[in-house]
């Protein structure tokens, strides 16, 4: 299939009623098109000459069955068929990464991504995520190998004093 040829996509214009839209479509119009097509749409762009400095323009907040990703540049859209290939230059190895499309963070497990989504997709994004322990409480380290050398020395010195 020659994906660049227009006639492959003509049926979608009739099927979804896209012929009556005013082109070029701006990213501001994406939410209304999502409602019309019942397809989630994510739009990304870049601001450097190599196309590596990517950022999200619009990430769908709608929980729809089908979602597509588009690249937007010079008032044109291109379909991103594989988001992991689109972000492939960030990977240092060939392991598959899972992506948060809102902040473009990457994760190696589905569980880590799901935990991240609890915080990244929040509507009240300005509220605090973590709470501090009550004032006057004491911290106890169980795994000293994760503590810096300076803190480890200070903890050992405090155990000598008490």
Image (cartoon, rainbow, N blue to C red):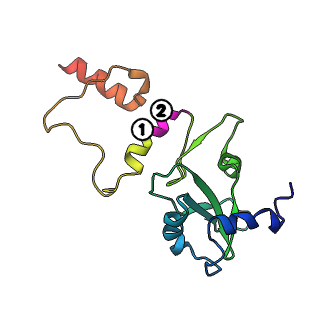
- Disc ID at residue 111: 2
The residues bearing labels 1 and 2 have C-alpha atoms spaced at a distance of: 6 Å
Look at the image and tell me in which quarter the N terminus lies: bottom right
Left or right placement of residue 155 versus residue 90 in this view:
left
Residue 7 in which image quadrant? bottom right
Predominant SS along the magenta part: helix
Residue 74 in which image quadrant? bottom right
Q: Residue at x 43, y 22 (%)?
A: 145
Q: Residues within 10 Å of mark 2 (few under 14, many from 20)?
A: few
Q: Is residue 117 magenta?
A: no
What residue is pinned by disc 1?
115
Q: Is residue 111 magenta?
A: yes
Q: Secondary structure at mark 2?
A: helix
Q: How many marks?
A: 2
Residue 111, x across and y down, in percent = 47, 32
Most distant residue in the right direction: 2
């Amino acid at each position: 299939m020659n994906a660049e040829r227009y006639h492959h996509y003509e049926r979608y214009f009739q099927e979804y009623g896209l012929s009556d839209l005013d082109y070029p479509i701006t990213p501001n119009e994406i939410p209304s098109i999502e409602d019309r097509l019942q397809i989630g749409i994510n739009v990304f762009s870049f601001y450097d000459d190599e196309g590596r400095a990517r950022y999200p323009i619009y990430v769908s907040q709608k929980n729809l069955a089908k979602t597509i990703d588009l690249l937007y540049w010079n008032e044109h859209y291109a379909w991103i068929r594989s988001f992991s290939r689109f972000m492939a230059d960030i990977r240092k190895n060939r392991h598959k990464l899972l992506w948060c499309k809102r902040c473009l963070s990457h994760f190696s497990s589905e569980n880590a991504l799901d935990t991240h989504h609890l915080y990244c997709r929040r509507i009240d994004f300005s509220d605090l995520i973590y709470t501090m322990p009550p004032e006057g409480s004491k911290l106890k380290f169980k795994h000293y190998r994760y503590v810096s050398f300076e803190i480890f020395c200070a903890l050992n010195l405090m155990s000598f004093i008490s």
